[in-house]
Image: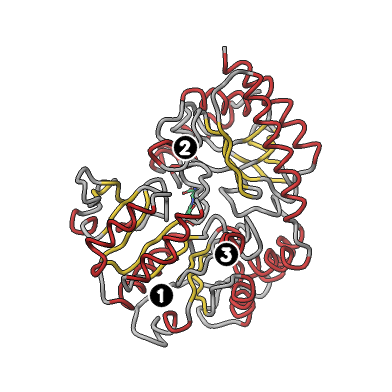
Amino acid sequence: MSRDRSQTAFQQARRLMPGGVNSPARAFGAVGGEPVFIDRGEGAYLIDVDGNRYLDYIGSWGPLILGHAPSVVIDAVAQAATRGTSFGAPTEAESELAELIIDAVPSVEMVRLVNSGTEATMSAVRLARAATGRAGIVKFAGNYHGHVDSLLVAAGSSAATLSVPNSPGVTGGTAADTFVLEYNDPAGLEALFAEHGERIAAVIFEPVVGNMGCVVPTAEFLAALESVPRAHGALLICDEVMTGFRVAYGGAQQRLGIRPDLTTLGKIVGGGLPVGAYGGRADLMQQVLPAGEVFQAGTLSGNPLATAAGVATLRALRDDPPYDRLEALSVRLAAGLEQAATTAGLPHTLARVGSMMTLFFNPEPVTSWAQASRCDTDQYGRYFWGMLDSGVYLPCSQYEAFFVSAAHDQGDIDRTVEAVSVVLAEVAK
Ligand code: KE4
């Protein structure tokens, strides 16, 4: 499999952009080697600039639940483009997308469209702080909510779970208002609120984690998330940027039966174009400018092309839900992966919710970052490259979920299982 043109492209890109990429997730840093440059996507497949075809399980890190270039989306975007790309003025398409989101997501009564998941979580945190008059935010290790300064923090050394910046440029002052706990630790949440409850504005969490690999919440943890913050006057922010419209049409909150105060969305709601959204209780959202006084703005928020892609995508998911078929394909794939790892004698666990899943190179079930961080990432790297050379495009990190799309079929799944059986046998040597 020649990747000469990708290598040339990468050398050129590295002279122009930091690390040659516009998001570090794409740089293959966690698995070594150099990224492939993509020429086009077709259904479940990516074709790189050297003409190699890959069965794609990333789907642009989640947005492409319908696969690459679905005609419903391409036609909608092309049609919208003939009328102009952006007006900086309200359009009816924004109301269409807002209404689709409100009708789908149980806890969302009002919504504001932005341009990314990061903008959504940043704005939801600001709103929670304004609505409660408090500064403290609680997040969980291994949960990622975009590159928001106050959320780019890691568990601090102190037992008080005070956090420390985990990026240069994030100030100690910013980190001082953020607490980091272990996911799936109800006692830790209760203890933190017992000590600091009166200064906490909100808890933000991934309802099914994708960003340390797929990690499923326990019922006890979900119960604590719904009761403990509220007992102390704090809000619950459910970050569904990855799970929204992925694990169910109504997101993880519909599947798990939870009701947060605010929800953040991204990825699928834009159908591959830049859309984020935050929404929830009307009494909270009415505090956002110009209805209220909490500032948030954006030149291209709700722009006609992105809303056209989002509306087309959500209508397709609403009118012809793919979730049962995605479940059947995902069950088949998960069984194949587990069988291959077991036959190869590799310690592993697999976590899956709907069409998002992760094969962990770890003998223990992964329920928090403490376990996730003990995965054998060298084995993962060999698995990644073996699959890539077999024409299967998996996330370039153990700590990312991967996805089945509606464009995948049973033949794709079976070819993937055949490849993984050969690759994992090699990894085990
Ligand atoms: P964006 O700003 O990248 O649109 O969304 C940030 C975000 C917020 N919340 C959750 C739960 C997310 O998963 C993300 C973004 N996810 C990563 C992949 N795990 C995006 C990939 C990338 O950064 O390139």
The residue nearer to you, when weighing 342 against 18, is: 342
Label 2: state its secondary structure: loop
What element does badge 3 sit on?
Answer: loop
**Location of residue 335 with respect to 85 vertically, above or below:** above
Q: Percent position (x, y) of residue 256?
A: 57, 60
- Residue displayed at 70% across by 50% down: 67
**Pointer 2 residue:** 27
The amino acid sitting under disc 3 is Gly
Mark-to-mark CA distance, 3 and 2: 37 Å
Visual colour scheme: secondary structure
Residue under circle 3? 257
Nearer-N-terminus badge (3/2): 2
Q: Is residue 401 left or right of residue 184?
A: right
Residue 256 or residue 85, whichever sits in front? 256
Mark before the other along the chain sequence, 1 or 3: 3
Q: State the image coordinates of residue 284 (x, y, percent, origin top left).
A: 42, 80
Q: Nearer the viewer, residue 91 or 8?
A: 91
* Residue underneath mark 1: 297
Residue 355 image offset from top left, x and y in percent: 66, 48
| Residue at 45 percent of width and 55 percent of height | 221
For residue 255, side relative to residue 75 (left or right): left
- Which part of the image, by quadrant, shows the C terminus? top right
Binning the other alpha carbons within 10 Å of mark 3 as few (below 14), some (14 to 19) or many (20 upward) gives: few
Left or right position of 397 against 176 = right
Label 3 beta carbon within 8 A of ligand 1: no
Q: Amino acid at mark 2?
A: Ala
